[in-house]
Amino acid sequence: MQDFSSSQTIFDFVLPKGLLDSQGNLHRKGKIRLATARDETMAAKDPRVQENPAYATLVRLSRTIARLGDRSHLEPQELENLFTVDLAYLCELYNQVNQKGHPHATVQCPHCQKDVRVDLSNAGEPLATP
């Protein structure tokens, strides 16, 4: 489980699917840092966010993802190519690390349609290691 101690400011993650870049490279392992007030205000000032408030998510993530694969800087438009499961994972992780909560989410089982509470702290990691 991820340690959300007060002294930690950078958190490792592994995306469930990964971001496929324009060269065909898949990036799954990354680091996200705590958000600052500047991250929030810069997102609010971004013209793309003023036109479409939902775009704030991509701006915030692009500012706080410290590394993804071999990339140390991502533009919001690059994050538009995230698979929806990866975007959901990053949004949940962002909320958890910035609110010092526990990385859990309620999802619906595709087979029985019941709601199930899952731990997202290792959601992108394989169930077993070789």
Image (tube, rainbow, N blue to C red):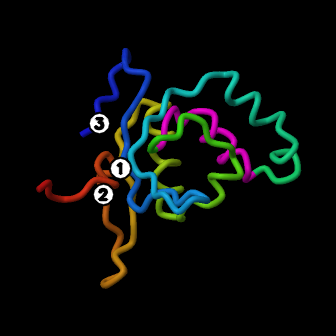
| Disc number for residue 43 | none
Q: Residue furthest bottom?
A: 111
In the rendered image of this protein, does residue 64 appear above or below residue 125?
Answer: above
Residue type (three-letter) at the residue carrying disc 1: His
Crowd class of label 2 (few under 14; some 14 to 19; many from 20; radius 10 Å)? few
Quadrant, the C terminus: bottom left
Q: CA distance from mark 1 to mark 2?
A: 6 Å
Residue at disc 3, secondary structure: loop
Whether 55 is among the magenta residues is yes
Q: CA distance from mark 3 to mark 1?
A: 11 Å
**What residue does disc 2 label?**
118
The residue shown at (83%, 47%) is 48
Q: Position of residue 107 (x, y in %)?
A: 39, 66
In the rendered image of this protein, does residue 26 appear above or below residue 6?
Answer: below
Magenta region, residue range: 54-68
In the rendered image of this protein, does residue 55 appear above or below residue 31?
Answer: below
The residue shown at (52%, 40%) is 71
Q: Position of residue 109 (x, y in %)?
A: 34, 75
Q: Do the residues under discs 3 and 1 have CB atoms within 8 angstroms?
A: no
Residue at disc 2, secondary structure: strand
* Among the two numbered marks 3 and 2 on one chain, the one whose residue lies closer to the N terminus: 3
Q: Do the residues under discs 1 and 2 have CB atoms within 8 angstroms?
A: yes
Residue type (three-letter) at the residue carrying disc 2: Val
**What residue does disc 3 label?**
2
The residue shown at (37%, 20%) is 8
Crowd class of label 1 (few under 14; some 14 to 19; many from 20; radius 10 Å)? some
| Disc number for residue 104 | 1
